[in-house]
Every structure is written in structure tokens, then in C-alpha cells.
Image (tube, grey):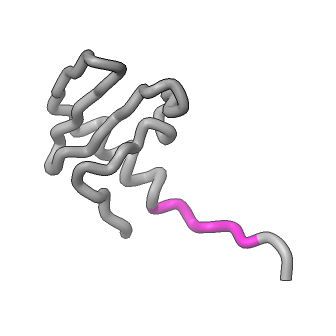
Amino acid sequence: MKTLEIDSNYGGVFGLNTGKGQQMIYKGGDTWMMREGDREKTIESPDTTKKALAYVSQPTIHMGR
């Protein structure tokens, strides 16, 4: 199983518009920081961590030869 990288933005995993500055940043353990512009909120969410781990652990599909 893969691991999550601390201080990495996983907003795309949760459907956030990362092109407009929406971020979901992994802070370690079950701690996440949500950021949009100058607003920030930190949460503890085991479910969010589980969902992100499941996403990054999916098998990769290679197209072509």
C-alpha cells in the first residue's frame, strides 16, 4: 500500500478546483488543512485519510505498448 506525503495537496482526489486555489493538504496522521485563498481550516478526519489512501493505492493503468 502506498502512503500519503505530508504537506502535499490532495484536493484533486476530492474533486476540488485546484486551478482556482482550492487545496486539501495532508498534514500527517488524520490531520488535513483545507485552504482557499486566504481562508484555512484544519480538521481531524480518519475517513478523509482512508479515502485518500484508497485513491493513491489504486492500480495504475498503462495505455499503449
- Position of residue 42 relative to residue 29, above or below, is above
Q: Residue furthest right?
A: 64
Q: Residue at x 38, y 32 (%)?
A: 23
In the displayed structure image, the side of residue 27 where residue 47 appears, left or right: right
The one of 45 and 19 positioned closer to us in this rendering:
19
Dominant SS in magenta: loop
Residue lying at 48% horizontally and 41% vertically, measured from the top left: 13
Q: Residue furthest top?
A: 39
Q: Residue at x 34, y 34 (%)?
A: 24
**Quarter of the image with the C terminus in it:** bottom right
Q: Which residues are magenta?
A: 57-62
Spot occupied by residue 33 in the image (x, y as percentages of width and height):
23, 32
The reply to whether the magenta stretch includes residue 59 is: yes
- In magenta segment, residue 9: no
* Quarter of the N terminus within the rendering: bottom left
Looking at the picture, how far across and down is residue 62, in whole percent? 72, 72
Residue depicted at 50% across the width and 39% down the height: 12
- How many marks do you count on the picture? 0
Task: Examine the rendering and report whether any part of residue 13 can be seen.
Answer: yes
Instruction: Work out whether residue 25 or residue 29 is closer to the camera in this orientation and state it.
Output: 25
Q: Quadrant of residue 2?
A: bottom left
Q: In the displayed structure, does residue 62 sit left or right of residue 41?
A: right
Image position of 36 with respect to 27: above or below? above
Task: Tell me: residue 13, above or below residue 3.
Answer: above
Q: Nearer the viewer, residue 19 or 60?
A: 19
Q: Is residue 15 visible?
A: no
> Which residue extends farthest front?
38
Residue 3 image offset from top left, x and y in percent: 31, 63
- Is 59 rendered above or below residue 39? below
